[in-house]
Amino acid sequence: MKELTEVEQARALMTEAIEWSVMKWLSEKKRVRKCADTANQVLNEAEAELHARWGPTFKSVYEQSGAASPETKQLASRIRREHDAANKFRMEAEKTFDVAEKRLSTAMAREGCRQAIEGWDHHLEAIRLAETALEIE
């Protein structure tokens, strides 16, 4: 898997942000949001590019409309689970950040950072697994 610099930068920023004060959060929230949005976009594009390169057999299995070996079905299922988990954590992080901003809660902002990082980890795993599917015709 190629290095996704924007994701690593976002991870570093979120890791740093876990220690920020309320005032730092207020002054940096736009930068954090922009960095997170960029990371999410890069991950989505990398995943879409891989899905477009899959062979027709794996595409049909991933879409749950094709017959294949148990191993191929298991791989498709794992990719889908990781992708779904990534989306779940992303949505949770966005909600947590919104509430944290309204309440001026650094504790909630820290939790949002952890959720965002967890979502990126799941998305990266989905991408790693999607790369292995390129070998399946």
Image (cartoon, grey):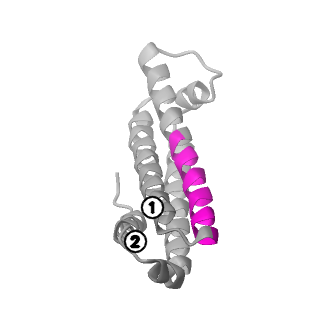
Q: Residue 115, percent across and down?
A: 47, 53
Q: Which mark is residue 113?
A: 1
The amino acid beneath tag 2 is Ala
Q: Secondary structure at mark 2?
A: helix
Q: Nearer the viewer, residue 100 or 130?
A: 100
Q: Which mark is residue 22?
A: none
Q: Nearer the viewer, residue 51 or 35?
A: 35
Kindly tell me whether residue 44 is visible in this rendering: yes
Q: Residue 101, percent across and down?
A: 60, 71
The residue that label 2 is drawn on is 17
Residues tagged 1 and 2 counted as in contact (Cβ below 8 A): yes
- State the residue at coordinates (41%, 18%): 71
Residue count near mark 2 (Cα–Cα under 10 Å), binned few <14, some 14–19, many ≥20: some
Q: Nearer the viewer, residue 85 or 78?
A: 85
- Picture layout, residue 129 above or below residue 110: above
30 inside magenta stretch: no
Q: Secondary structure at mark 1?
A: helix
Sequence order check: which comes first, mark 1 or mark 2? 2
Q: Residue 51, percent across and down?
A: 54, 43
Q: Residue 110, percent across and down?
A: 44, 63
Residue count near mark 1 (Cα–Cα under 10 Å), binned few <14, some 14–19, many ≥20: many
Kindly tell me whether residue 137 is visible in this rendering: no
Q: Is residue 7 left or right of residue 36?
A: left
Q: Main SS of the magenta segment?
A: helix
Q: Quadrant of residue 20?
A: bottom left
Q: Nearer the viewer, residue 133 or 80?
A: 80
* Region rendered in magenta: 85-102
Q: CA distance from mark 1 to mark 2?
A: 7 Å
The amino acid beneath tag 1 is Cys
- State the residue at coordinates (44%, 27%): 75
- Picture layout, residue 2 above or below residue 122: below
- Picture layout, residue 43 above or below residue 25: above
